[in-house]
Structures are given as structure tokens and as C-alpha cells.
Amino acid sequence: MPQSSSRKEFSLPEGTHTVVMGVGDANGIMRGKRIPASHWEAVCREGNALSASLFAIDVTCDIWDTPYVNFDNGYPDMHIFPYGEPFALPWEPGVAMVMGRAEDMAHQPVPIDPRNVLLRQLDRAEAMGYEIKIGTELEFFLLDPETMQPKDKGIQVYGLERAAELEHVLGPIRRQINACGIPIEQSNPEYAPGQVEVNIRYDDALIAADRVVIFRSLVKQLALAHGYKATFMAKPFFELSGNGFHAHYSLWKDGVNVFADNGKINATGLSFIAGLQSRMAETSVCGASTVNGYRRRQPDSFCPINASWGIDNRTAGLRVIEGKDSAVRVEKRDAGADCNPYLLLATDIAAGLDGIEQAMTPGPRSDGNAYKDTTLDPLPLDLGDAIARARASDWLKDVMTEIQWEMYLQMCEREWQFYLDDINNRVSAFERDRYMGNF
């Protein structure tokens, strides 16, 4: 996979005194450093050094011995270089932010940088003559930072009164993130108190993935500035709707959407769907890498439990949207809003391109309630099953590369073991309530 080692000096917005530069870690969380503007020229030339363990920490920033960074090699450094022009943060005068890219000390791609998994699939798509466009929809909760509960009550999905009630925080999120160069199309209250959805306009796949990483970081910053705690956790409250990450895929060649034929999905689009269907179970860990991510997968929850597909069918895992040729696309609905976008999009693209190359045919279309469709294998319903599917997948190992696959699955296995240790080494409230007074 080619990666430019050229050094470019990116100009800073006028009045900048501090630059925030980061990359997406193993979980797609943006991490990095704040850099004085006086040091910016040196960073553009030489990069900014930080430990390569950034790509090998879990969501709590805990470390373990991975194949790439470990105690035996001393957790060595890597360098982060700016990737694109810094943009001013409207709510922090004098502060600019920029996405970074990572190089190891030999100026080569870092083997466990998840962004490289996506870059390889985009190189593959380019060799096939395709540009991949992706639009993203992310759901998140706005909570009281003290109680960690929603401040509002009741479900008001699409409610304009609820939208006005939240406008003091959602308005800045839309306007100021849009001013940062991330084109926000719309926002709306979702299917739970405190839950909202924001849609980011489609663009090239790498831009779309980078924007998700930046967007989640900016939403959290803006929420705090307005008295809220934002969380993209997949299922913060079991009795309420979960937070999904819906990815809308289309492939383009010479300015034409190759999925479309007179506003309908065509054979190429159906083959892409078939490829996605064939790999949804074994790539589940890329859309849900935590125990909590599988709490969303419940019947009649608008989170899919199988690899079904349908036309404008929100009970299916793969929803086809038709209309103008430019709008024909496939929406994949299984991932949680807290997933790593590079790994999710990369494995989806790899599966879809396989489907096109092999002229695959999807399973029967689901025209009714896809939760009742028993013709397809179910998706994993817990992290343990998802890990087992991924461990058994030579295909996934090849797409991710063995070292990235191993490190990522080690992280998932640690999450699973922490959960098992927790439930096996304590007496639950259920047990006390049910047994203590009756025995």
C-alpha cells in the first residue's frame, strides 16, 4: 500500500496559537497532542513523536503485550504528521485542529494503524476503476454530566418541539461542526429521551471515515461546553433505543453511480449486497467490539439480527434506498456508533468488492419483517460468538493483515474476559432480590 513520505507545511488559520492533532486509535477514538503554533513548522517537517501504543490500548487506555508494541521492545515511538489543512475551532479562539497520519520510525505505515486497512481496500477499488462514496449517520445521547441520565423525558422521535428544546446544544453542534469542514445535513431527536441523530453528507470513503473520528471528538467537546455529556456508547440504557452507525454505500465510475439503473438497484449493486451478506457475521467485531455493542441486537429494535436485505426496509440489515440514480445506495445498519469506522468501512468494502468480482447473488429479499426471516444465518448476539467467528476467518485476517487482526482480536478477547470475570466473581442484584429473602 503506497503512502507518501513527502513533507508538506500546512498553513494555520490566522490567529492560531495552538494546534490539536490526532489520529483514530484501535477503537476509533481521536487521540493526540496539543502543539504550540510556534512549533508547527517543525511538526510539518519532522512529525510529532508519541508512543505507538496509541494503536494498542483499549477504551480505558489500558495496555497489554501485543505483537507490535510490548514490554520487550519498550513500547517504541512513532511520528504523526498533519494530513490536510488545520481548521479553526469556533468555540476555542486561537485553537485549530487537524487530522494526522502515522509513520513508524523508518517512515513506513504503522502495521497496527486501522486507517491502513481502509487505505488498502481503497487502492483495490481504484484498481477496479471505482470511487467509493459513503454517507454516515450516527446516534448519540446527550446526558446530564452529574447523573449520566437524560435531562428530558419521553420519546419524541422527529419531534420538532423536542428539537427546539435541544437547539441550544444541537444548533452549535450542527453549525460549528459544519464550520469546521464536516458538512452536516440534518439533526433530529431519536427514539429515546436524550437521544439524537446527526447525518454527515456523503463523500469519498477515507474522508467519510476521518470525519466520523473527528465528529465524535468535536461533539463531546461541544456537549461539555453546553452542560451535557455526549456518549456514543452502543447501548447506554437497556430499556431504551441504542446508538447505531448507519453507513450508506455507493460506487462510482466516471461520475456515474454504478449501483443505479433508472433509479433502481442493479445487478452490480445486488452483487455488492451479496458480498456484504456473506461476511456480516465474521466481521461483526468491526462494528461492535465490546460486550455492550451486542445489547443492541434485539428483535424489533431496528438493529438487525441477521444478514437480510430489503428495499427501504428498516428491519433488514441491508436497506436499499432507491430514487434518483445519484441517490441509489445500500445502507448497512448493524454497527454501533462507538465502532472503529476504518475497520467497519474497510471490511464492508472488501466484502462488497468480492461480491462484485465474483458476480455473487444475494439471498431472498425481505419484503416484510426481516426479524422473522429464518432463511439466513443469524448475526452474533454476543461478543464471544463474534470473536469466535472472526478468529475462524482467514478472509478477515487477510483483509486486516495478521498483525492488525491479532492485536484487535486480543483487545476484544480482553473485553470479553473482563465481562466474564465480572459476572462470575460477584453476587448480582438479581440473585439477592430473588433468593436472599426466600431461603
Image (spheres, rainbow, N blue to C red):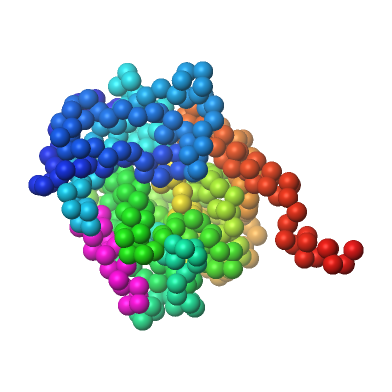
Residue 35 found in image quarter: top left
Q: Is residue 193 above or below residue 130?
A: below
Residue drawn at point x = 27 percent, y = 51 percent: 203
- In this view of the protein, which residue sits in the foreground, 170 or 211? 170
- In this view of the protein, which residue sits in the foreground, 194 or 327? 194
In the image: residue 398, left or right of residue 383? left
Residue drawn at point x = 73 percent, y = 46 percent: 425
The answer to whether residue 426 is seen in the rendering is yes
Residue drawn at point x = 32 percent, y = 31 percent: 102
Q: Is residue 280 above or below residue 35?
A: below
Characterize the magenta stretch by its predominant secondary structure: helix
Residue 297 found in image quarter: bottom right
Residue interval drawn in magenta? 163-184
Residue drawn at point x = 30 percent, y = 22 percent: 107
- In this view of the protein, which residue sits in the foreground, 178 or 400? 178
Residue closest to the far bottom: 161
Q: Is residue 338 above or below residue 59?
A: below
- Residue 181 shown in magenta: yes
Residue closest to the far left: 14
